Image (spheres, rainbow, N blue to C red):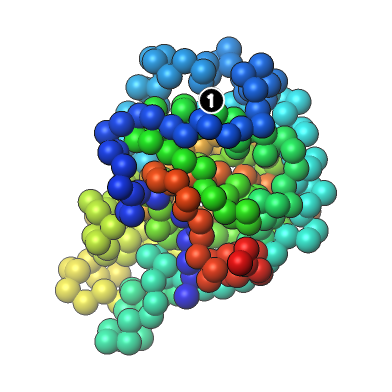
Amino acid sequence: MWMAVQCVTTSTSTADDSCASADTSSSSASASDIGSLVNLEAFPIEDVSRPFLAAARTALFETGVASFPDFLRPAAVAAAAGEATLASPTAFVTDNEHNAWQTERNTSLPADHLANLFMRTRVASVATDEIGPTLKRLYEAPELLAFLSALLQRPLFRLDDPIGACTINVFREGWHHAWHFDEAEFTVTLSLQAADEGGHFVFTPPLRTSADDPANAAVASVLRAQTEHAFSLPGDGTGESGGAAVPVRTAPFAPGTLQVFAGRDSFHAVTPTRGPRERLVAVLCFASRPGVRNSPAVQQMFWGRTSS
């Protein structure tokens, strides 16, 4: 089974999600330090009352993505990318298959049913205890935590996970991430380095109304239009045409861009990379209660070891 790292998870939260508070108790980034990392002129994240937050929140819930290009200063991008490149050779490689919902095969359904369509994903990941100081300083900055809490209108806490709290996805030549929904409601990523070609983040508007809604017809439409996979979906009435077209967009994701996307409800993928330059993307994980960490099974799958 393919399992997703929980990046902004709320399903087990006991906190009031209407609150916009954040855990700012522990950080290695000072108030003056955040300005050396983040482009505060464009994104004054230290002031969560700024109007740009409302526009970003609207984009997130209407399109599935809120994008902040040039969020990191050029020097910080260069430093973080250099540190990631040094760590990349020993990143743990996951080469696995998963269906659209990252769930187990359903033996009660036909083998060619959409639910049993498993697609290959290849990605490597640099663990939290292997990342460089630049990304660590950003992840631990209280200003970033308060900013994301205000954007999502819920309290957020950094993961208490020494392996999977803040990591770097590495896509080498020809690698890609197949179409899927995330387990986490929202995911926070930061582009550090683009591939020579390809490696595009493609996504749909939110298709699901809840984690229990498979959005089968819409998923089938996207996969029939975007891939060559063959599958059946009895009773959907779409035939081979795939039914009503679902719009698919490509998110601009130049190095230095911070992106928050509704990965649980928006269907998304990363297209195959081409060329020797690796696609490097930081994944910043948060939870809506303190003390959360990935399960040993998830740690073993993504980083080849556990913290216990």
Frontmost residue, 110 versus 154:
154
Where is residue 33 shown, x and y percent of the image?
68, 21
76 displayed left or right of 20: right
Where is residue 205 shown, x and y percent of the image?
33, 44
Frontmost residue, 84 versus 157:
157
Q: Residue at x 51, y 20 (%)?
A: 45
Frontmost residue, 139 versus 255:
139
Where is residue 53 shown, x and y percent of the image?
40, 22
Name the element at disc 1: helix
Q: Residue at x 70, y 52 (%)?
A: 129
| Placement of the C terminus among the 4 image quadrants | bottom right
143, above or below 165, in the image: above
Q: Residue at x 54, y 50 (%)?
A: 160
Residue 90 visible somewhere in the drawing: yes
Residue position marked by numbered label 1 in the rendering? 143
154, above or below 98, in the image: above
Kindly give the residue lying farthest to the front in the view shown. 25
269, above or below 54, in the image: below
Where is residue 97 shown, x and y percent of the image?
52, 73
Question: Residue 27 occupies which quadrant of the picture?
Answer: top right
Q: Residue at x 32, y 61 (%)?
A: 219
- Number of numbered labels in the structure image: 1
Residue 249 visible somewhere in the drawing: no
The amino acid marked with disc number 1 is: Glu
188 displayed left or right of 304: left
Packing grade of label 1 (10 A; few <14, some 14-19, many >=20) is many
Frontmost residue, 75 versus 197:
75
